[in-house]
Amino acid sequence: MILNLFDFQSDAKNYLLDKVNDPSSKQRIIVKSPTGSGKTVILISFIEDYLLYKDPNKIFIWLTPGKGDLEEQSKEKMEAILPNAKTANISDALLQGFKPGYTYFINWEMITNKTNNALKDSEKKNLYERIAEAHREQYSFITIIDEEHLNNTTKADDVLNAFVAEREIRVSATTKKNPMAEYYEIPEEEVINSGLITKALYINPDIDIDQVDDLESEALYLLQKADDKRKEIKNEYIKNNEDINPLVIIQFPDMSTSLINKVEEMLGDLGYTYDNKLVARWLSEAKTNVTNLEENNAQPNFLIMKQAISTGWDCPRAKILVKLRENMSENFEIQTLGRIRRMPKAKHYENDLLDYCFLYTFDEKYKERVLQGGNSYEVKRLFLKDKCKSFKLVKQYRNNDYNAIDEVLVRDLAYDYFMKKYKLGTVIEDNKKAMEASGYIFGTLVHSTFRSGKFQQLKDIQNMKLGEHRQIAYEVSTHGNGIDMLHAVDMVKKVTGVPRDTMGAILKHLFHKNFRFSKKLLNLSNPEWYAFMINNAYKLRDDFQELSSVANKNYLQMLDIKTSTWKLPVEDFYRYAPYEKDVEVYEKNAYKDYSTAMTVSGLRSGPEQKFERYLENNDKVDWYYKNGDTGQKYLSVLYGNSLEKQYLFYPDYILKMKNGDVWIIETKGGEKQGESQNIDKQSENKFKAFKRYAEELRRIKWGFVRYRDSRPFINNTVYTEDMSSEHWHRLEDEF
């Protein structure tokens, strides 16, 4: 079975496969996996591929933290995803010994706690004896340590050392780099884009700190704000026909009994009590109303908690965290924040209230640390100026009836692309020579590079310029290199959007002799095809990326494009840098109080920063609006690529000139010292769709704006990257 993974999950899995199979890699592998990224699914997929393509007899040891049943949850998840998987627990290992091809799910508490018997001498064999028995049978282990930041103890190390694992994989949301280990970090932005977690964390929306003056009034104020936000979110779920009851988590430090009692009273005054089932508590000393608490429609609106619940607990309906003062450890804070980052149905709604999570706190030290963690911002609600409220445009959005992958179309386009680019023909051997002359590698040898040399410091190893890079080649193995081949297919799949199975079939039809196809480019045997895919993975990726970005001349004309009337949002949340100095209000922005604190690096690209400054200083501009990057509330234009996939792009700016002209502008990376800074491969497809959109509306002006060195240029006629072309002219000639 092949799991359907997101690209970032597939990349993480492939990284693990690569490192585990690389004899030169370090024994320990650390993976930083943001909460909600699906680390369990990634690990299950890794185990599946390893057993299938590398070694079916390997034994996996999956260690989980805490006193709970996280190991059983992980075991059940693997059994649900892979019904034929061989799974077991610590009891199975102690009773029957370790068996090849099995994955053993073991809770640390079961083997390290003094009261447990797994390590003790008795009539039955203990864990150490069973491990020694497995080694005598010449079985080998790979260990997986879930939430690796926990259980870093001497006893835990003793158990790990006993396994003598070939590889030790440590996974956590809060893990840190270690010079003695390989390190991989799953990009949080890719997890966000997948819809698995919220787009960002908003801190203290609509808070006025002057309204509180002591701890009790502060707590009440935060609770009221959180409750107001909860009600707003609840109403939005209802509007979207979702049976989801958003949860507010109230977090306390350990020494806080009196404060907990006070908060319970405050919640009672607001109408929320344990008796009416609207409040739950999860404390070491007491648990109330926690049965089925994680269900999306569970009754409790508030959860009172301390640190005990921060690890190994998932409640996707949790949307708001109230953090009362008193400091805690950074790990706890990050883990707790992870509880409110998950999306209940693993999708975004293009609605800020549903796609974001919220933190309310007056703990400044804590807030600063969160802000430094990325994707967490102070936000201000801005209101639209009266003169902009009547402005209207037409927005386009995807027609899902036209978004299926046509395997035949992709295959034919790929055939035409390779024929044209490499000047191929009907003689297979001549095609092989032509592609070889352009850098493609053929044969049954897998070519690899390794590095040697003297490195005085550990950090020197990270400098790829140091040392000697040497080539090595070995005969391909369709079994031993199966993972490498899948990795190559995944690289192509990622740039095309075509599913792995479909992409693999397309590549085989084009290049593999056993797949009959009238338009065949090569006739490779099975070993040749494996070696071809592995050796040429990057060239194939680049070719298919270029193919998918080729301008589509006809696709949009065939579509029944869906449209609707669009207005500037009457109010919107804007992220800003709270500690920015010398803040200047941009008077020409469509929103009141829009300022330079909202245009700093990290919130705006370099071209956007320059362009907003240009608009602010331009006497011809009446007002301008910075469009959002994604979401139903923002202006979108539909475009298609050569593979007939539909996408939306969101033009950066809408301008209203004092003479009544309306401009829509898309900013792109410019040109510096003759070198293009534009990295958007779909620029031409967007340009042509944008042009068609403007022509249909007739009454608007439009253009792509790029900076050549420090001067802005505009193009709205014929797409070209070459800024010396006549189609690019100075922006000041327009306005």
Image (cartoon, grey):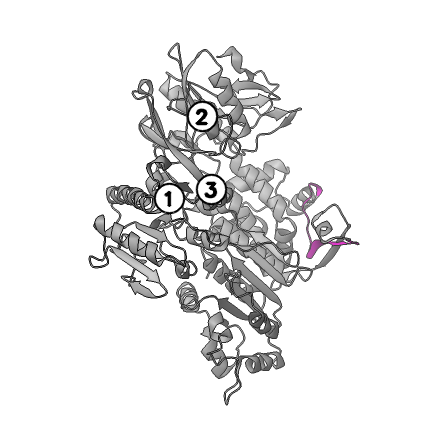
Q: Residue furthest front?
A: 214
Disc 3 crowd, CA 10 A, few/some/many (<14, 14-19, 20+): some
Query: Pointer 3: what residue?
Result: 375
Could you tell me residue 637's position as x and y percent?
40, 29
Is 349 left or right of 413, judged from the image as shown?
left
Residue 448 magenta-highlighted: yes
Query: Pointer 1: what residue?
Result: 358
Amino acid type of the residue that numbered disc 3 sits on in the rendered structure: Asn
Q: In the image, is residue 404 above or below residue 251?
A: above
Mark-to-mark CA distance, 3 and 1? 12 Å
Q: Residue at x 66, y 56 (%)?
A: 179
Q: Residue furthest top?
A: 659
Disc 1 crowd, CA 10 A, few/some/many (<14, 14-19, 20+): many
Q: In the image, is residue 568 above or below residue 461?
A: above
Query: Pointer 2: what residue?
Result: 595
* Image depth: mark 3 or mark 1 in front: 1
Amino acid type of the residue that numbered disc 1 sits on in the rendered structure: Phe
Secondary structure under the numbered disc 2 in the rendered image:
loop
Start-end of magenta stretch: 437-455
Q: Residue at x 31, y 44 (%)?
A: 217
